[in-house]
Amino acid sequence: MRLRFTKMHGAGNDFVVIDATREPFVLTPEQMRRLGDRRFGVGCDQILVIEPSTDAGADFRYRIFNNTGDEVEHCGNGARCFVRYVADAGLTPKRDIHVDTMNRRLHLLLQDDGRVTVDMGAPVFTHAALPFDAAGLQPRLVNGFELWPVEGAELAVLSMGNPHAVQRVDDVETAPVLALGPRIEQQARFPRRVNAGFMQVLSRDRIALRVYERDAGETLACGTGACAAVVAGIRLGWLDAAVEVQTRGGLLRIEWAGGDSPVLMTGPAVKVFDGEIEL
């Protein structure tokens, strides 16, 4: 089959975007793996699929697949690219849209300067949401929030619609992301695996961040990872309510008022090119 696609990125986190609003999405996992392969396909961190909404309260359905072909719950950088795509492709006249993911509804706003703000929903701290098995572990409480001893690190665990385990490091450039990241990702205490975040606190309103993502490995940016790191930092008393997150791919702004308030993420969404591939 011949497939039309658009290549996009959000702070270096790159995507293949597929418009399935007119024809159903029919790619097999094997075809998605080829599409996501950087040597034999197009190459991307994730594949984003735009489908018609099945609910009157949402404008579109938003599906995310890792480049392994596995469908996942959420991708914040992808959500920004999603709204940029549907606006540029004329799929909606709105600049303020709602989309349904696998497990939550997102509110996306295209700003006048081209950046996109995403209402990522409220963070979830219950262990069942990740899930996380804490049996036999004794956490250390910091500002009333738990840090769990796993793989020799102290992890803050939470869900942003997908699972995250965040640790504080002295320097993200020398942190053992490529060695420790996959060990945390695949740790048996996270039955569905986990995204491993490495956060350096630069000031109360700025952090540097690297994330080792499930399936994808380290990416240049992870939107939900940035949200999880800032939420964890706020809960631990290290950060204020609005934080600039420096990733290897660019700058994201994360805001959280605490409690059940939603996390707001603002950042870039860039079209790279349109293309076709035979799969």
Image (cartoon, rainbow, N blue to C red):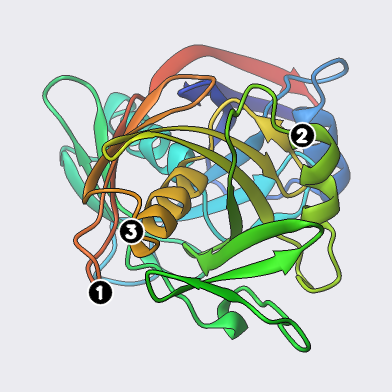
Q: Nearer the viewer, residue 33 or 3?
A: 33
Q: Is residue 257 left or right of residue 274?
A: left
Callout 3–callout 1 Cβ contact below 8 Å: no
Q: In the image, residue 217 lies at what x, y percent?
A: 76, 37
Nearer-N-terminus badge (3/2):
2
Residue farthest to the left?
Answer: 112
Q: Tell me which amino acid carries mark 3.
A: Gly
Q: Specify whether residue 202 is in view.
A: yes
Q: In the image, residue 121 lies at what x, y percent?
A: 32, 64
Question: Which image quadrant: the C terminus?
Answer: top right
**Which residue appears at 46% of the width and 54% of the height?**
228
Q: To which quarter of the image does residue 104 belong?
A: bottom left
**Which residue appears at 23% of the width and 49% of the height?**
240
SS state under label 3: loop
The residue pinned by badge 2 equals: 176
Q: In the image, residue 21 lies at what x, y percent?
A: 45, 47
**Which residue appears at 26% of the width and 63% of the height?**
262
Nearer-N-terminus badge (3/1):
3
Q: Residues within 10 Å of mark 1 (few under 14, many from 20)?
A: few
Q: Nearer the viewer, residue 129 or 167?
A: 167
Nearer-N-terminus badge (2/1):
2
User: Relative to residue 13, is residue 256 depicted above or below?
Assistant: below
The residue pinned by badge 3 equals: 237
Residue 259, numbered label = 1
SS state under label 1: loop
